Image (cartoon, rainbow, N blue to C red):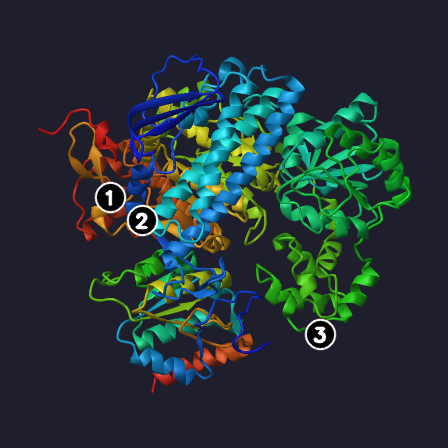
Amino acid sequence: MNSQGGIVVNKKGVHFRIKEITSDLAQFRDLSITIGAINQERWDEPMGPTPFPSLTTLRPWDQKLLSRYKPFYLPFCDLCCLCTYGKCDLTGTKRGACGISMPAQQSRTVLITACIGAATHISHSRELLTYVIERAGRDCPINVGGVGVEVEAPITRLVTGIKPETLGDLEPVLDYCENQVTQLLAVTHTGQEGNNLDFESKIFHAGMIDHLGMEVADIAQVSALGFPRAEPETPLADMGLGTVDTSKPVILVIGHNVPPAAAIIDYLRDNGMSSSVEVTGICCTALDLTRYSDKAKIIGPISWQLRYIRSGVPDVIVVDEQCVRTDTLQEAAHIRTPLIATSEKNCLGLPDRTADPVDDIVEGFVNGSVPGALILDTKKVGEVAARVAAAIAPKRKKHSALPTSHQLAEWAKKCTQCMLCRHACPNDLPVAQAVKAAAGGNLSLLDELYDDCLGCGRCEPACTQKIPIHSLIVAAADRKTREESYCIRTGRGAIQDVEIRKVGGPIVLGEIPGVVAFVGCANYPKGSREVAEMCMEFARRRYIVCTSGCSAMSAGMYRNEDGKTAYEQYPGGFEAGGIVNVGSCVSNAHIAGAAIKIASIFAKRPLRGNYEEIADYVHNRVGAVGVAWGAMSQKAAAIAAGFWRLGIPVVVGPHGTKYRRMLLGRADKDADWFVTDARTGESVYGGPVPEHLFFAAETKEEAMVMIAKLTMRPNDTSKGRANKLANYIDLHKRLVGGIPPDVFRLVRTQADIPLTMKDEIVMHLEEHGWKEGTIPDPTLLPRMIHKKKV
Amino acid sequence: MPLNESWQTAEIPGPKKASLIIKPDIADAMIRRAKRPIMIVGHGILEYEVEGNYLIDCLIELAKKAKIPIVVSASTNKEFLARGYEPAAIMTAIDISNRLTDTEWKGLDGKDSYDLAIFVGLPYSMEWTILSGLKHFAPGVKTMTLDCVYQPNASWSFPNSTIKDWAANLKGIVTNLGD
């Protein structure tokens, strides 16, 4: 098929359109073939130009972004080890045996990463959708917010042109996602794509597809499992090790796919056991379980796995998929707790007991003859977990793997101060010093490490004396862990249309200085507390703060002087000064969805299959910034890529440089910052805003200043720009020192200058020879010009 | 631990690794040889104090003697200002490093490209990846780290050393520059 053809997928059907094809046998023109169901049109909005975009449909848009935000490569390895030609040394300008260059190899690796992330979300989404269709039926209506949410699936509508009404309508969306990820992964094979920027465009495509998959997952579970439906003030859920009633049997669920955990809640409820068994969770399954039941408790983010398991509190561990430690079975064995694996993607080498009688499985677990089992029947998981927890708890007596204070000191005395623990620590924590102090009876240094420890446990295999260092840290922080008692606002899901209508204007005009979304994992450089501090700082400054995933937990794991968490201090509405927990990882789609809905609902831009125009609007007008302070996973990379294609900048912590490249603008190159004024068609200087698309900050302080700067957009009104500048300058003065050196690039007219800072800014502008500019009606798309240039 | 092994386990780059600065004279010679050096100072430098002396003071002295412009990242600026020293620029480590890969960039003063970039005080893994970026994409810029840990992606790096030895090395460089 030649490049003039196209494929449209509608409701389980596929439509091929071939403009011209020539072969040895014949030549066809305008050939049209439809396979599958007939498209039942139920949406009167005209179809936009790019429904179901292929790998290259949005390439021109990506190229516009990439011409401004160029990759700054940070190779994590100088070699390519992907094929048997290699290893190939790609240092500097060297090329590999296949001809690949270092820039292309780095972008290729990012694409592989984004594909892994997207595939994981899409696979999760497929599993969830299959589950909820079995439970509620294919005709179950989609309901993510009742009458408050008319645009129920903004990403789906935007990307595919489908307006889903039932769970069944979501299936072709996932068909498309699966198809695209397969094609994207094929791009990374040896001898395929060779240009770094084409790899980058495909990374953006993977990100967009990832967001689509996430949206399907969350609207499916919200619609069918009774989760909160876009309610601003969802209930507060208990969070922290200290909230667990350890006198009861305790079940721990870990992962991201909630059905097995929900089945546990169902079984306990149906059998009158809800008040006698604690159900606790780590990572996104925990977040989603609190959306399902007010009985569930969150222990903490991904980094709490080792510390909680080793505490001995869980009597049964149930793992599903994603971000589950792969040594959980071994860890569980140390505390004599049985483990149930529930996902085909995470079998852990366990025997498949799905078809076995429940009584047999329970007996094996309780008598200790079986350390774990794979059970692929969700309902059966619920019954087995509940019954085993109740039966085994009296026998286990919360058997802990943590040392007593005497054992701790004895272990510490074995330390030879070889420093290998510190060399293994991703955060370069002074572990050996702390162990040395503990050997002398001073546990305070170990206790201090607890706050900054990632919980990865890399220090332990590094130790030549086999000291269980992580356990020493957790044991030394015993008081802290017992006092970990916080709360989190339950994930609300989507943002209501009425909220968008209220804040759309103030956001686009800049009167609400920005939307800052704290998302992603817990690979923090200095502990969870920094996320809470950043959330509260921006909420106090009247930004709209969104949270999701592990970051949503971290935001709540800090109490102020009055003993209140961020969620108790700030409202949960999508409003100035709100802290909005949308939910788990897949709920990130609602944050992107809110930006899209601002373009669609507030600005009334056509949504259906109209990606470029909406992205152009979001990039130039919606002051949104994503912050993944502890981004660790491939999923985080895919999520970020989805925001990049919408032109939304993402800030990561210092570990984020390991994602192999940044996407940076050059504020000093004026030519890079011209936009088209849609009113006149003139090319005008729009200023270096937003300055970067992907940026790693060295410290929390640097991140906060950068976040404030990245919320600026060419479209800001003077009042809005003055508000954004006031926040940026104030944060810079407080955290960095002095007026920012680039204010002259960000002030377009005298009216942009914040009144309270006028004198010093005027002086700064004079020093830099500043000249008054204009405020454009900005676009990067020539077709958006209202009046063509004569 | 071997002197020229990455401070963090498994941070192994590839065939091209930093030469060791085994004595201050080497660093001193590199600085003297450079036509356009620049120093990038991260927040980590604020943590170090040896026998009552803050190492940031040593860097200021070094910069003054060698006439090296200092770029400060994160919140390091405040400490320099508190000591009456105004850095040449406040910039993020990512931004300044990105500019260093641009062969057409004429430096902070608009006069010419830099030929030596000296890094100190960034988080280890962040500095590791930034130096990797410069190793591959800034062929005209030699890099040197003044940290007390080995950075394999630099052109020259101190070996892994104690804080005390490190401080002595830095003082040694400053003393030599004063000759």
The quadrant of the picture occupied by the N terminus of chain A is top left
- Side of A308 relative to A220 (left or right): right
x%, y% of residue A318? 74, 39
- Side of A399 relative to A105 (left or right): right
Q: Nearer the viewer, mark 3 or mark 2?
A: 2
Q: Chain of mark 3?
A: A
Per the image, the residue denoted by label 1 is: A673
Give the residue type that dot 3 points to.
Thr
Per the image, the residue denoted by label 3 is: A416
Crowd band around label 1 with a 10 angstrom C-alpha radius: few (<14), some (14–19), many (20+)? many
Crowd band around label 2 with a 10 angstrom C-alpha radius: few (<14), some (14–19), many (20+)? many
From mark 3 to mark 2, how far is it between C-alphas? 48 Å
Whether pointer 2 and pointer 1 mark residues with C-beta atoms closer than 8 Å, the reply is yes
Whether pointer 3 and pointer 1 mark residues with C-beta atoms closer than 8 Å, the reply is no
From mark 2 to mark 1, how far is it between C-alphas? 9 Å
**Residue occupying the point 16% across, 31% down:** A681
Per the image, the residue denoted by label 2 is: A665
